[in-house]
Image (cartoon, rainbow, N blue to C red):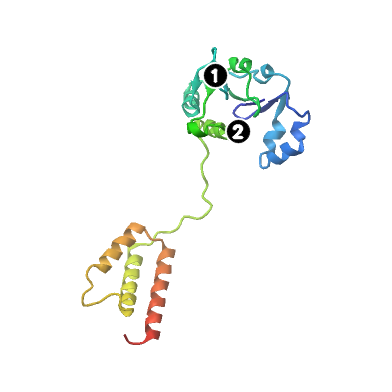
Amino acid sequence: MKVMGFRDLVLVAPRFADVLCHEEAVAMASGAADILARARVVPTLAEALDGVDFVCATAMTPRDFGPATHEPRALFAELAARPAAPRVALVFGSERYGMSNEDVYRCHAVLSIPTNPDYGSLNLSQAVQLLAYELRQALGGFGVTPRAPEASRADARAVQGLLEHLQTALTEIGYLDPAAPKKLMPRLNQLFNRAALTEEEVHILRGIARQMSKTAAAAGPR
């Protein structure tokens, strides 16, 4: 059984005595070896919950009685908003047997992950990942760092230069009739404005226009 607080991982009577250095556990902790290294192993759930203020069970509420069932996102938001944020534990049972009723009775709330009722079965790792994510989001989440630099948007002068270049190329390939241009160029202008072209995209389109002109010249008079 696992008990997860904001930062702690506690294993209750695990199957393997050497679980913290077990080959499979180390492999599965790839990228998070520090969490495994800080984990504690205790013989009972009572010891694991020592110092915890609010305990959430990840199991069905027993039929006779038990704590109220909550949707994780709403409950975590409520807990995080309390003036004195409680130390929260998420208790996960084994993937095969789940949690006993006695363990659920110790908890203040039961969490139910909203799923399509036709596909409601989640394995333990999926449940841990979803609930850990929701808990982290309730605490403010993490920012996303862009991997690529932000592209520079082309200014109006660059877009007009592109339009003039395209107008020449379109005329050379016979697509645009200068005597009856209709509203082709204004429509392209609006298209480019909506697209919010970057400087690199302007260069690409002007390169296409240059190749159009070269192809038209090589083909000779129409």
Report whether 211 appears left or right of 111.
left
64 versus 199 height, above or below: above
Q: Quadrant of residue 179?
A: bottom left
Residue 55 rendering spot, x and y as whole percentages: 58, 20
Q: Which residue is mark 1?
A: 61
Answer whether residue 115 is visible to the viewer in this image: no
Residue 115 versus residue 70: which sits nearer the camera? 115
Instruction: Single out the residue that lies furthest toward the bottom.
Output: 220
Residue 222 rendering spot, x and y as whole percentages: 31, 85
Residue 94 versus residue 7: which sits nearer the camera? 94
Disc marking residue 19: none
Could you tell me which secondary element the residue under label 1 belongs to?
loop
124 versus 158 height, above or below: above
Disc marking residue 123: 2
Cα distance, mark 1 to mark 2?
A: 18 Å
Could you tell me which secondary element the residue under label 2 belongs to?
loop
Instruction: Single out the residue that lies furthest toward the front.
Output: 118
Question: Which three-letter amino acid code belongs to the residue tagged 2?
Answer: Asn
Q: Answer with mark 1 or mark 2, whichever residue precedes in sequence.
A: 1
Residue 7 versus residue 69: which sits nearer the camera? 69
Residue at the spot 61% in from the left edge and 26% down from the top edge: 5
Answer whether residue 13 is visible to the viewer in this image: yes
210 versus 42 height, above or below: below
Report whether 211 appears left or right of 54.
left
